[in-house]
Image (tube, rainbow, N blue to C red):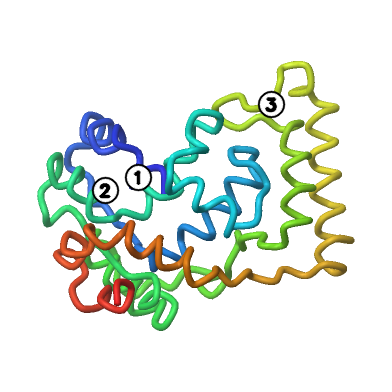
Amino acid sequence: PDYLGRPESPGLLHRHAPEARLVAVLREPVSRTLSAYFHYMRRGHLPTLPPDEGIPRILDGSLGEQWPRAWEVLAFSRYGECLERYRACFAREQLCVLVQDDVIRDPSGALRRIYGHLGVDPGHVPPGLEDRALPTVYSLPRVRFLSWAQCFRPDDEGFAPPAVASLPGRLVYLAAVGVDKAVLRPLLGNPRPDLSTSTRAALRAAFADDKEKVLEYVGPAALPWYE
């Protein structure tokens, strides 16, 4: 998501690899935004609020000053704008765009398309093709616990205070992750929340003007996202 969404990414990639063959996989934008919202809470980049409280505050900008990465939750789902920035740096034929639903429905077919784009052996089948390694944690109590544990493990921007970004701090973080997997996940499960009608409508409205740009890249496959 960072490579696709951050405005500086296309220029930096072109500077270092101007002939690169690029692949983007797009997920239905409301679902992606909800998943990102929980991921950012878990990483300590957003307050741990129910999505029907927090997402409207991202939409109206009221979280932006205190939580400087809040804008990414929405902006990274505006795929048309993101892809246009890549088109400004790379030729159209260098970019292969797929829809996640198609990848899930036919992973082998999607992989063959990617292999063709990259010009490599189309018959290769990698191990673990059906695996999903990074499921989103949607249980709000688990997210709150993991967000607390995150302060012992700095991210790339040094989120954790240096005093706890030490080996003991990292061990505390790993122990907390173990507690989540062994205790909290079996106890609390991972129920995915249903957004309220008003929040879902507000998100669709926020992405509506991006629709035509997205359709240029993936065609009718993306139409259900905006209806």
The disc label shown at residue 160, or none: 3
The tag on residue 5 is 1
Q: Position of residue 158 (x, y in %)?
A: 61, 24
Do the residues under discs 2 and 1 have CB atoms within 8 angstroms? yes
Question: Residue 76 location in percent, x, y?
Answer: 38, 49
Horizontal arrangement in the rendering, residue 31 relative to residue 112 (left or right): right
Whether residue 28 is situated above or below residue 16 in the rendered picture: below
Amino acid identity at mark 1: Gly
Image quadrant occupied by the C terminus: bottom left
Q: Amino acid at mark 2?
A: Cys
Judged from the image, the secondary structure of the residue bearing numbered disc 1 is helix
Residue assigned mark 2: 82
The residue depicted at 83 percent of the width and 45 percent of the height is 176
> Quadrant of residue 186 in the image?
bottom right
Callout 3: SS? loop
Q: Work out how far the residue at label 1 is from the one at label 3, CA to CA, in angstroms.
A: 24 Å
Count how many numbered circles sit on residues in the image. Answer: 3
Nearest to the observer: residue 225 or residue 99: 225
